[in-house]
Image (tube, rainbow, N blue to C red):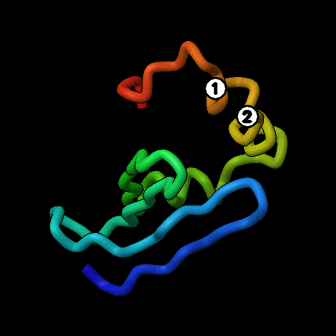
């Protein structure tokens, strides 16, 4: 893996690194608060780039999923 960077704000802290252990390079993201990890390949990253502002706002709404107490982290 390449070097790791940490992207943070007052609301979140996420480590970002390039994982080259799959068929093609992808981003490895880790929520440093919970340890939850997600891998994003080029197709997923492109989809994020093309999301409308409204769709991105809905995705980022913490009340929709992120901070629900009844949410199972295995669902992600």
- Single out the residue that lies furthest toward the bottom: 3
Q: Is residue 52 left or right of residue 66?
A: right
The spot of residue 70 in percent (x, y) is: 55, 13
The spot of residue 45 in percent (x, y) is: 51, 59
Specify the quadrant that holds the C terminus. Answer: top left
The numbered disc on residue 8 is none
The spot of residue 20 in percent (x, y) is: 22, 73
The spot of residue 63 in percent (x, y) is: 75, 26
Q: Which residue is mark 2?
A: 62
Specify the quadrant that holds the N terminus. Answer: bottom left
Vertical placement of residue 55 versus 2, above or below: above
Residue closer to the observer: 43 or 22: 22
Q: CA distance from mark 1 to mark 2?
A: 6 Å
Q: Is residue 76 left or right of residue 47?
A: left
Q: Are marks 1 and 2 in contact (CB under 8 Å)?
A: yes
Q: What residue is shown at x 40% (from left), y 24% (from top)?
A: 75
Q: Which residue is mark 1?
A: 65
Vertical placement of residue 9 versus 51, above or below: below
Vertical placement of residue 14 versus 51, above or below: below
- Single out the residue that lies furthest toward the front: 33
Q: What residue is shown at x 53% (from left), y 59% (from top)?
A: 46
Q: Is residue 37 left or right of residue 33?
A: left
Q: Is residue 67 left or right of residue 42?
A: right
- Disc 1 secondary structure class: loop
Residue closer to the observer: 64 or 72: 72
Tell me if mark 2 has few (under 14), some (14-19) or many (20+) residues whose alpha carbon lies within 10 angstroms of its own. Answer: few
Tell me if mark 1 has few (under 14), some (14-19) or many (20+) residues whose alpha carbon lies within 10 angstroms of its own. Answer: few
Q: What residue is shown at x 73% (from left), y 34% (from top)?
A: 62
């Amino acid at each position: 893996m390449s070097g790791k960077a940490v992207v943070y704000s007052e609301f979140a802290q996420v480590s970002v690194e390039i994982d080259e252990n799959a068929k093609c390079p992808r981003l490895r993201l880790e929520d440093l608060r919970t340890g939850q990890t997600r891998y994003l390949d080029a197709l997923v990253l492109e989809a994020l780039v093309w999301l409308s502002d409204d769709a991105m706002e809905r995705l980022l709404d913490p009340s929709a999923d992120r901070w629900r107490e009844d949410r199972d982290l295995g669902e992600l």
